[in-house]
Amino acid sequence: MPAKPKTPLSAPVSSPDNRRADLIRVAARLFREKGFDGTTIRDIAHAVGMRSGSPFYHFANKHELLMAVMEEGLRLGLERTQGAIDTSLPAADRFRQLVRTHYGILHDTGSDFIPVMLYDWRSLPVQYKRRIIELKDRYDAIWQRTLDELHAQGLLRADAKLARLMILGAINFSATWYRAKPRSAKRVDLDELAAQTVALVLHTA
């Protein structure tokens, strides 16, 4: 009898979770480059290789996708910060770790999520902001504990809560002006930027 023809192997199919993650990642990049209002669902779908209506299988609307971008940025930032901070160290050393980690969250390759939150927060409807604020409060609490200790030790002159708002505000604003230069050019890298920020804040004399 003739041999039965072999059944061709099926091409791997991306899981819904992977496609959702692709949409969030690409939306973050496009929202950062073009702004929320300047980016369409069609733009995002095209960049991911989907039909223009396919993102709506994963998100009810563009605002929900914006919320997912912000939520993912805060989740990743929280995980990264918790992994980077050594709670056994003195408060001053933990503060240095916090500052350097936050610069990395903003500027390392693929770090589009938090800048989107900074630029497009006003575009997010109130009902979506509640979930983002909950995550942001958890992130802020890590900073606040360290700054409270620094203030108690006399290493931070300013009110600790105001200091958190001002320090994070200043670091976050670097998303609008900091660009890493080619290695051949004189540049300030993130390590030096973090060190200079700490020197501005801590009172060590």
Image (cartoon, rainbow, N blue to C red):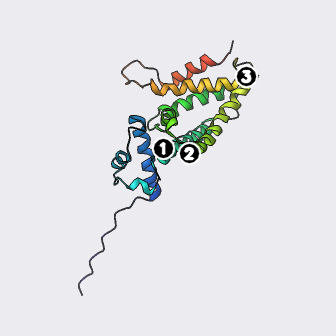
* Residue assigned mark 1: 66
**What is the quadrant of the N terminus in the image?**
bottom left
Which quadrant of the structure image shows residue 32? top left
- Which of 122/76 is in front? 122
The disc at residue 128 is: 2
Q: Residues within 10 Å of mark 1 (few under 14, many from 20)?
A: many
* Residue assigned mark 3: 151
- Which of 127/147 is in front? 127
* Mark 3: amino acid: His
**Where's residue 143, x and y in %?**
65, 31
Query: Label 2 near label 3: C-beta < 8 Å?
Result: no
**Where's residue 178, x and y in %?**
45, 24
Query: Label 2 near label 1: C-beta < 8 Å?
Result: yes
Q: Residue furthest bottom?
A: 1
Instruction: For marks 3 and 1, give the CA distance.
Output: 36 Å
**What is the quadrant of the C terminus in the image?**
top right
- Which of 173/90 is in front? 173
User: As displayed, is residue 7 above or below residue 11?
Assistant: below
Q: Which residue lies furthest to the right in this view?
A: 152
Instruction: For marks 1 and 2, give the CA distance.
Output: 9 Å
* Mark 2: amino acid: Tyr
